[in-house]
Image: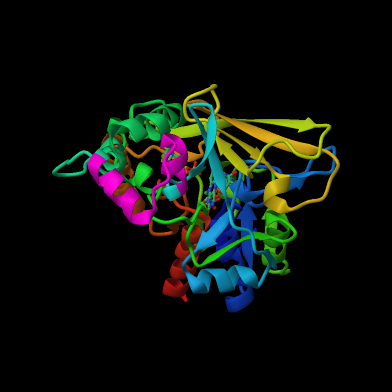
Amino acid sequence: MKFKYVIVGSGLAGLTMAERIANVQGEKVLVIERRGHIGGNVYDSYNNEGILIHNYGPHIFHTNDREVYQYLSGFTKWNDFWHRVLTYVDGNLVPMPITVETINKLYNLNLDCSQVEGFLKQESVHIDELKTSRDVALSKVGQDIYEKIFETYTRKQWGVDPKELDTSVISRIPIRLNRDTRYFADKYQGMPSFGYTKMCENMVKNKNIKIMLNTDYKEIIDHIEYEKMFYTGPTDEFFDYKHGKLSYRSIRFQFDTMDKEEFQEAPVVNYPNDYDYTRITEFKKLTWQDHKKTTICKEFPSSEGEPYYPFPTKDCKAQFALYEEDMKREEKVIFLGRLAEYRYYNMDAVVRRALDIFNSIS
Ligand code: FAD
Ligand code: UDP
């Protein structure tokens, strides 16, 4: 078999690349995917009860990148969905991320925005140089809120203390000195009106794109002639773990369908301190589907299983740097995506990477 381009992995990185190559260059491209479906971790599907679920955990599209938003809008309409999260602390549900409402509810106060600024200033711990996720949280909200909201959640999610994780992890969560209780403040936010899988299917509607499912690329790659490969799988696996296994964090998703219309007050409720799971998602509240029953998903973080999250510590980055040297030497292969680049990318960042790489080779 002969293709100019081979793409390993049909997540958003791989599909964006395939779409651009086929539609803009008019070239033939083969996508090889180990799973039985396209979409990677954004894959969604209807369960036995007919409820649309996100098979790999809740995915909410949000970006400030107009070009990425416009690009994906070519393949889907959007529900103008604004994500909201509540977190269960001391027996109460309070808005996440931390806003004026959160502080007032946590401490039974009635402060205005500037008073909350003063409150947090008083609570915050002065740290000269922020080196870890613990430093970030303490310097923004102080010890008590750190313990209530961040410390145990982060331990559950990553299996280590926040002081082991670099600043990027807890920095993902903003602290807002206003009453904006949306989880994301990005300019463009939404949920694909007919789901992520439909959006992905629309991306690859081109006869120049051939997709091979249920196939590990290593099983067949020796039988394919190609000029360039785009690899979006785990990098350590590509190099047969020559510098050791990279650490990834996994999650066990536990789905449950209930014979009632509604389960919880928000699309996602976080449980920082109680139970072994980190959060519960109620899918109908993300997708706006009308249904008599409802499906929820509990997330149990784990060090075993599918790699979902690259591990953001100094040691892991140093280990990945060894692989990066090898990546540079692979002339026929371009590495991109959350697994291959070992980066905690969101969906928009992965699409941005693929668009930039496509532009650089065109
Ligand atoms: P992936 O989606 O991981 O795709 C890689 C593909 O390569 C997979 O399908 C895999 O099967 C395939 N593959 C790997 N090895 C091989 C091989 N040897 N042969 C063949 N195929 C192979 N982002 C957001 O913007 N908003 C969110 O709300 C959000 N929530 C998330 C929640 C969870 C629980 C997780 C895990 C991630 C979330 N993300 C979110 C991030 C988002 O999922 C990623 O940014 C995006 O899906 C990454 O796309 P990708 O193509 O790089 O990788
Ligand atoms: N986090 C936390 N408490 C929360 C929510 C998040 O401590 O209630 C921390 C935790 O370390 C998590 C990180 O902030 O891994 C990023 O959270 P985000 O919601 O962005 O995680 P994701 O959706 O990527 O799993």
Q: Position of residue 120 (x, y in %)?
A: 29, 44
Q: Is residue 105 magenta?
A: yes
- Nearest the camera: 178 or 136? 178
Q: Which residues are magenta?
A: 101-122
Left or right position of 64 against 41? left
Residue 350 locus on image (x, y percent): 49, 58
Give x and y (percent) for residue 50: 84, 43
Please check the rendered image and state whether residue 299 is part of the magenta-colored stretch, yes or no: no
Q: Quadrant of residue 123?
A: top left
In the rendered view, tell whether residue 121 sits above or below residue 78.
above
Q: Is residue 218 above or below residue 147?
A: below
What's the residue at 75%, 37% (across, down)? 295
118 up-or-down from 351: above or below: above
* Residue at the top extreme of this rendering: 275
Return the residue found at the far left.
128
Residue at x 74%, y 53% (from the top left corner): 288
Residue at 69% of width from left, 47% of height from top? 285
Say which of 141 and 207 sits in front: 141
- What is the x, y in percent for residue 20? 58, 71
**Is residue 287 rendered to the left or right of residue 26?**
right
Q: Is residue 263 above or below residue 287?
A: above
Quadrant containing the N terminus in the rendered view: bottom right
Tell me the quarter of the picture where residue 225 sits. Answer: bottom right
